[in-house]
Amino acid sequence: EAGVAQSPRYKIIEKRQSVAFWCNPISGHATLYWYQQILGQGPKLLIQFQNNGVVDDSQLPKDRFSAERLKGVDSTLKIQPAKLEDSAVYLCASSLLTTGELFFGEGSRLTVL
Amino acid sequence: AQSVTQPDIHITVSEGASLELRCNYSYGATPYLFWYVQSPGQGLQLLLKYFSGDTLVQGIKGFEAEFKRSQSSFNLRKPSVHWSDAAEYFCAVGAGGATNKLIFGTGTLLAVQP
């Protein structure tokens, strides 16, 4: 069974530029999550989708971050404009059910200069 | 508010020695508790979880954890550490219910000496 796929693995941009990360969850998983992991900290949930609807985006900085999950499968997380403090690893995870085990991708590491 | 504390930022053990990683949580109801492991450049992998029932839970790779409600703890243990166990370990608490929002601790980085 294929795992959660993320791309790109690494991205370096300058502040005020934009960036987008893509996630393909495990086939059949209805729930998809984006987490932000800043160096030295644990992952923090940014947004949770159930199919193509948002369940929780309370910690998403909506002035610069946006995410969508068209057709309830793939998801894209966008940052525009990026700030230095957005440097982090962005982890995508999926689960079969809302209370099921989360399966994480390898993450996309963003460096903002 | 829910929170997770991992008091040890970095731990070094010798290969073959026993291991205990500490985790304390703050949550009003019965929590869902998890331990994840993250190897360098990799995503997080679930080691074990506690939802209810037996307070001693067994996980993958020979790990176990014990839920102690009186101490608000969920410590991870392994009787004999292998060099391949070197990684970062995260404890997390989940709200359960309609969402599976995990709140992670700051992690404990484990180094294994030969």
Image: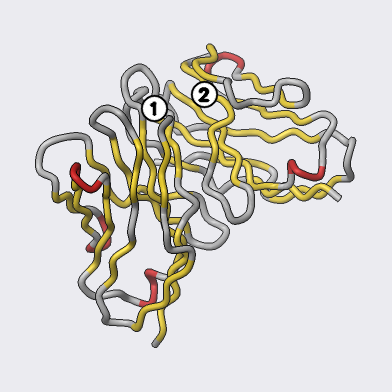
The one nearer the camera, B14 or A21, is B14
**Residue to which mark 2 is pinned:** A48
User: What's the residue at 58%, 30% (across, down)?
Assistant: A46
User: What's the residue at 23%, 31% (across, down)?
Assistant: B30
Q: Chain of mark 1?
A: B
The one nearer the camera, A10 or B57, is B57
Q: Residue furthest bottom?
A: B114
Q: In the rendered view, would you say B65 is above or below B104?
A: below
- Residue B17 position in % (x across, y down): 27, 80
- Number of disc labels: 2
Q: Chain of mark 2?
A: A
Label for residue B100?
Answer: 1
- Residue A5 position in % (x across, y down): 55, 40
Q: Quadrant of the N terminus of chain B?
A: top left
Tell me the amino acid under the disc marked 2.
Gln
Query: Dividing the picture into quarters, in which one does residue B55 lie?
Result: top left
The one nearer the camera, A43 or A67, is A43
Q: Considering the numbered disc 2 on the image, is that residue within a helix, a strand or a loop?
A: strand
- Residue B34 position in % (x across, y down): 32, 44
Tell me the amino acid under the disc marked 1.
Asn
Q: Residues within 10 Å of mark 1 (few under 14, many from 20)?
A: many
User: What's the residue at 58%, 20% (across, down)?
Assistant: A57
Q: In the rendered view, would you say A19 is above or below A75?
A: below
Image-based side of B33 in relation to A108, left or right:
left
The answer to whether mark 2 and mark 1 are in CB contact below 8 A is: yes
Image-based side of B65 in relation to B26, left or right:
left
Q: Considering the numbered disc 1 on the image, is that residue within a helix, a strand or a loop?
A: loop
Image-based side of A49 in relation to B91, left or right:
right
